Amino acid sequence: MMGFFDGSASGSPDTLPNNTSTSTATTSRSIETPTTPSSPAPSTQQPGAPQIDFKKITDTEDGFSGMASNLFEQVIVGNPYFAAGGGLMLLGTGLAVARGAMVRASGFMYRQLLVDLEIPSKDKSYMWFLEWMSQYKHRSSRHLSVETNFIQHDNGAVSTKFSLVPGPGNHLIRYKGAFMLIKRERSGKLLDMTSGTPFETVTLTTLYRDRALFGDLLSEAKTMALKAQEGKTVIYTSWGPEWRPFGQPKKKRTIGSVILDSGIKESILDDVKDFLKSGKWYFDRGIPYRRGYLLYGPPGSGKTSFIQALAGELDYNICILNLSEANLTDDRLNHLMNHIPERSLLLLEDIDAAFNKRDQTDASGFKSGVTFSGLLNALDGVASSEETITFMTTNHPEKLDPAILRPGRVDYRVLVGNATRYQIEQMFLRFYENETAKAKEFVDKAIALDVPISTAQLQGLFVYNKNDPDGALSMVDTLKTPNHVF
């Protein structure tokens, strides 16, 4: 035991090499442990990166297609990066493509199933439609605009009428069983230069099969608008470069209410009617299709009244142009005369006053922005209008320049003078029917005064003595004073 203990504990040189050898051998065996042939070599790629087995790809038996399929599975399907980002990319691309397809499909369906009608604010039917829709019952509107008609009478009383019309926005109506979407839009950038108001449009949308209802709707709106002016004469005046209605439409004056001397009224009316139906005759011969009339005579003889009655007889309107207006220029005059509203007579009142003192200064109040040559060119120059009927009136024909009286500018001249025996009798009988004997007595007394009597004086006397012919007879002496006040 002692020998054994001593050998172990002393660590003698005889035993130390044996122990060291044993330890080294054991360590060597643990390090050199062989690996199995199937274990892959340690990879040098980053963690998570896709690993491609090229041997597996090349050993496939399906040829090139099999190699491509195997490569796709390894690179795409087995790629965690693609599964995270590429999938979202594909999803986004698919949604974008689907959205584009839906937009194109909806656009195609819109073009095939729906139809639009746009009405700009400059079109005449624009106000017709708004007025029609404001009175249409079968509509749904959440956006309204107010239009106020304000009238202040001479006695200070005020009459106000409010009309609620569709405002900018969307509206829905049902017209003859068809639904229509109404969209009124107001431009914030574009302005109507003639009125200074924002440019607007109204768009009507309905099914394509109901497109014929657009014509019916506009015709109904037109009829409603014109019905308000039926039996009336619209008076237009110039406003900037355009014509605008002045005041409310006036009730038509019958041609029989104006008493002119025998045959004058009939001859003018026949001449105008013949002109209106002779358009082809003028065009075939290359003659400008326009006609000018000059009515001259003393004040109060009925010149303007006859023109108003003539317009009512022909169902025409009247455009009044004041040549003495300071802002009226040659260009604006020419533009206005070339843009007269349809079925309208052009009236130039007191044409002698416009150029009688055109050499004076602005301080005298007679200077006009229109030159005499500008008026002549507007009446029959190269840029003058066609298909127009112009009436000019004057109290002093002797003051007119001969250049304005030549044919082509004035084609028909007629004197509308003071009341004649015929006119006095006819006016008396118009106010007092069946009073033939008293009419003759009144005529004899009036002629015996031996003074000029205007039809305006006679009308004032008869209006003062309504339903009283004896009162008119007793006051016949008042006709001596032209401006007598009753």
Image: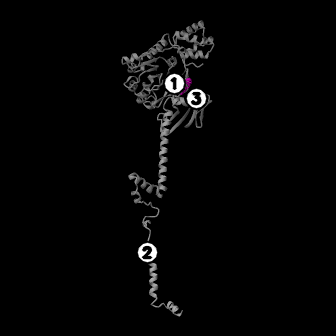
Q: Which residue is mark 3?
A: 177
Q: Nearer the viewer, mark 3 or mark 1?
A: 3
Task: Tell me if residue 218 is in the magenta stretch.
Answer: yes
- Work out whether mark 1 precedes mark 2 in sequence or the reverse, and give the earlier one: 2
**Left or right: where 64 falls relative to 219:** left
The span from disc 3 to disc 2 (Cα, nearest Å) is 97 Å
Seen from the viewer's position, the closer of residues 27 and 225 is 27
The answer to whether 323 is drawn above or below residue 84 in the figure is above
The N terminus appears in which quarter of the rendering? Answer: bottom right
Amino acid residing under circle 2: Glu
Disc 2 target residue: 32
The span from disc 3 to disc 1 (Cα, nearest Å) is: 39 Å
Q: Earlier along the polypeptide chain: callout 3 or callout 1?
A: 3
Which callout, 3 or 2, points at the residue further toward the start of the chain?
A: 2
Scheme by which the image is coloured: one colour
Whether residue 274 can be seen here? yes
| Amino acid type, mark 3 | Gly
Counting from the top left corner in percent of width and height, residue 411 is at: 41, 17
Viewer can see residue 481: no
Counting from the top left corner in percent of width and height, residue 444 is at: 56, 7
Q: Which residue is mark 1?
A: 235
Above or below, 357 relative to 271: below
Q: Secondary structure at mark 2?
A: loop
Classify residue 54 by image quadrant. Answer: bottom left
Q: Amino acid at mark 1?
A: Ile
Magenta-drawn segment? 216-228
Q: Position of residue 151 (x, y in %)?
A: 59, 30
